[in-house]
Amino acid sequence: MNAMLPAHLTETLNSVGDAAKALTVEVREEGQRRDAEAHAAASAARRQNRFVAGLLVIVAVLVLGLLTIVVQNRLRANQNSEILRQTANTSSQIADCTNVGGKCYEQGAARTSVILRTLIRAQIYIEPCRKVSSTDAETEACVMRKLAASTTPAPTPQPSVTAPGSSGG
């Protein structure tokens, strides 16, 4: 049953076979081209993913840095507020002691007045005590006795320092 095919049919079959081979080659080449494109696309996607991940890491580090700065600024603001409160208290105390009419100033003036009166009296008592004494120690003892007898006790000053955190006057 091997019959011979006519020549034009053999030629047609050969043409169809050649066309099938060429089509097979084209399909394989197309498949390889698509595989290469898919590989290139996947590689590009991986590069893009790494780039985006790197950017996200950088942004996270920057945000963490900003948060650290914000926290440090808040702590410094709290410290500065405390320093300002302490400075205000100290300034208030200084003003109380350096301005006429301040409680501390008036107490200091009263103490200074008592000391000056005592010094003046001591100067007055030195000459009479020298006349009756032969040594400096006896003269000093004489002056001290006369001062003790003539001096009224100095008023005990009350501190004008206010407690930290309260407003003083």
Image: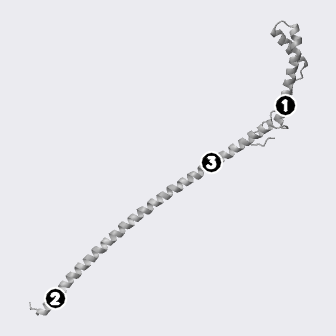
Residue that numbered label 2 is attached to: 13
Question: Is 89 drawn above or below residue 61 in the view shown?
Answer: above
- What residue do we see at 56% from left, 51% from top? 68
> Residue 67: which quarter of the image?
bottom right
Task: Look at the numbered disc 3 and give the secondary structure of its residue.
Answer: helix
Q: Earlier in the sequence, mark 3 or mark 1?
A: 3
Measured as percent of width and height from the top left, residue 143 is found at 86, 14
Residue with the mark numbered 1: 109
**Mark 3 vs mark 1, CA separation in Å:** 43 Å
Name the amino acid type tagged 2. Leu
Are discs 3 and 1 less than 8 Å apart at CB? no
Q: Amino acid at mark 1?
A: Ala
Q: Nearer the viewer, residue 149 or 115?
A: 115
**Residue 9, relative to residue 20: is it above or below?**
below
Between 10 and 125, the one lying in front of the other is 125
Please give the residue where the numbered disc 3 appears in the rendered image. 75
* Label 3 crowd bin: few (<14), some (14–19), many (20+), radius 10 Å: few
Viewer-side residue, 18 vs 66: 66
Q: CA distance from mark 3 to mark 2?
A: 91 Å
Helix, strand or loop at disc 2? helix
Task: Point out residue 167 in the picture as x, y percentages from the top left corner.
Answer: 78, 43
